[in-house]
Image: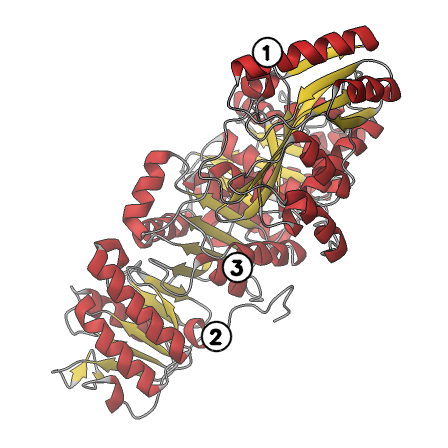
Amino acid sequence: MTPLDTAAPDLDRLLSPRSIAMVGASNNLNSIGGLVFANLKRSFSGPLYPIHPKDSEVQGYLAYNCLQDMPQTVDLVVIAVASHAVEGVMEQAVAKGVGGIVLLSSGFAEAGAEGIALQQRIADKARAAGIRVIGPNCIGYLSIGGGVMANFALTPDEPLPPGGGVALVSQSGGFGSYLTTKGLLTGLHLGWFVSTGNELDVNIAQVLRYLVERPEVRVLLAFSETLRDPEIFIEAARRAHTLDKPMVVLKAGRSEAAAKAAMSHTASVVGAADVFDAICRQYGVIVAGSMEEMLDLGMIFQDGRRVGGNRLAIMTSSGGAGVLLADEAGMNGLAVPTFPEDEQDKMLLVLHRPFFGNVANPIDTTAAARPEAIGALLNVLASSDSVDMITTVTWARAIGAAKDLATYYQRTSKPMAVLSTDLVEPLKQAGVPTYTDPQRVAKSLAALYRHSVRKPLNEPGWQYEPTRAARARRHLQLPPGEYVLMEAQGKRLFAEYAIPLTREEWVHDLDEAVAAAERIGGKVVLKVMSYQLPHKSDVGAIRLGLQGEPEVREAYLSMLAEVRQRAPHATLDGVLVQQMVPARMELTCGLQRDPLFGPMVAIGLGGVLVEQLAQTALLRPPFDLDMARAALGQLLQGRLIQGRRGLSEHEQEQVATIMVGVGNLALELDEVEEVDVNPIRVANGLAFAADALVVLAGRSSTMEHQ
């Protein structure tokens, strides 16, 4: 394996075992122990040892009373016994030197305090011995290439999956079984399925990181309730992007109610959905909106076909279906170009005249077209330079047509998706992506196009700068009990990170204020500095648009008088005299620390619009100016950076500089918990941080921002 930042998890003995034992194996095929052992014996070609305290033989295999009685150690032990017996089995596994354990048993962290303590003891024993564990409270895994059916997602009377390039990882066992079954029924070529359960050791991120390096894996699907190893998840995403292996994630726990359900189900912590989506977008992971969409994407990606463009050929015997497919294609960013006349002539030749349909695109063959003409028409499309992808329509009862489509699909290298009234066996066996709704066809092909033309991940070469960090920390020295910097202190902190600021001076009497306003020139703003007044406008601690000595003097005196009356508790520490810059547009940039993914920088509309529109884009540092500008392009469907009223090139650069500065600050100063730059005032090719709210760790509750 080729690591990116750290090596992929060492899970070979667990997930690619050469020998297996099962504790709890049974002759009763109606029990989990009997079912799982029957699955194991029908697929595994290496040494297989059932462990049973009484029976001398299990399903035709010589049985052993306990793990110590086995003639040799094994790579993998599958455990399906009551939870109270697991600790003893774990001790035997440690003594025997096994490599990995699939712990199917339930009754652990999901069952309350006693189960939590038991799970922790088992985790401690496994960690001390270097044994990797999947589970507990899971349904195991399957690896078709490795011949391992250590699961009860499928029953022994069901045919073995044909195998293929799709790997599915699910924290939930029951729903993972549902996904596996539904995926196989729809034609998904599933080579791997792994259920991780409570994740006392091995988690979804680690499994993805391992599987992404497997040469047989082409696409990774994951159903996640939480992520316990965000850095490894990001490494897996980077590797997937580099190796051109699409990673598709369906995330549960987006609502508060769902988060509570996830807590009770897997004893997990569920991260914020918007942060998770932003992480996926930043590192090239596709977020599926539904189970159906995740499986649909698995279908379109599983054979590894790629495209250079978004041009779609639509062929159908129904004009209405063609129009509907064209509508969906356009709404999903695909083009349906009109074929050139010479290609239309080729189509008309194979369809034979008189022909009463249409070959411009969508192609309406009408119901009168003969099967051989349809085949010849498909061959014309396969060789056409005018389209990149093909979709067509069939009926489930037309088995002959389905066989012809399957043969054609295997001959052409162009991606194809079929719209059918139902799933058809010949198309499933050939791996032809088949859907029962035009929207699913278009969304899947559009996702294939976007993945095919994706850009390389930007890997900014950020390095910690200890000298800068030491200078910056001088601005964080606050009196005991204070956790929020005054604006003037925050601006000095920003200056260390090259964040563009308005001209300003921090003064402590009236004459200094007048002199500062004269040096700054033009209109100025006065702001009272006080640790007790983070929200200055609430108590009249701000005056705007002042020019000339009389205005500055009068405003200075009236402002201080108002503050003393409205906030007599506040200790005042001078006044900030600030350049008042024009604003064609106001933005906001902020920092929050997500409990799972760490620092996240947000950029959005600012000023009075921040609450009403609440549009933000999120980035996880480190990131560079290009990535920051790309995030700006996500706002308002791209309108923020386009058109006459959008941000100019230099304004984008300035805003991006603020974003990068906040990100670098977050990486170097762990004690900074929160930053709010609102507003960023933008006009005349320039952007300035006009305010600064910086909150240090230790504050009991986050402030409500204006």
Q: Position of residue 280 (x, y in %)?
A: 57, 45
Q: CA distance from mark 3 to mark 1?
A: 71 Å
Q: How is the image coloured?
A: secondary structure
Measured Cα–Cα span from mark 3 to mark 2: 18 Å
Mark with earlier residue (3, 2): 2
Q: Position of residue 241 (x, y in %)?
A: 64, 53
- Per the image, the residue denoted by label 1 is 562
- For the residue labelled by badge 1, is the local secondary structure a helix, a strand or a loop? helix
Give the CA distance from mark 1 to mark 2. 71 Å
Residue at 62% over, 59% down: 239
How busy is the neighbourhood of tag 3: few (under 14 within 10 Å), some, or many (20 plus)? many
Q: Amino acid at mark 2?
A: Asp
Which residue matches tag 2? 12
Residue drawn at (76%, 11%), measured in percent from left and top? 553
Q: Nearer the viewer, residue 185 or 453?
A: 453
Q: Can you tell which mark lies on residue 165?
A: 3
Label 2 near label 3: C-beta < 8 Å? no
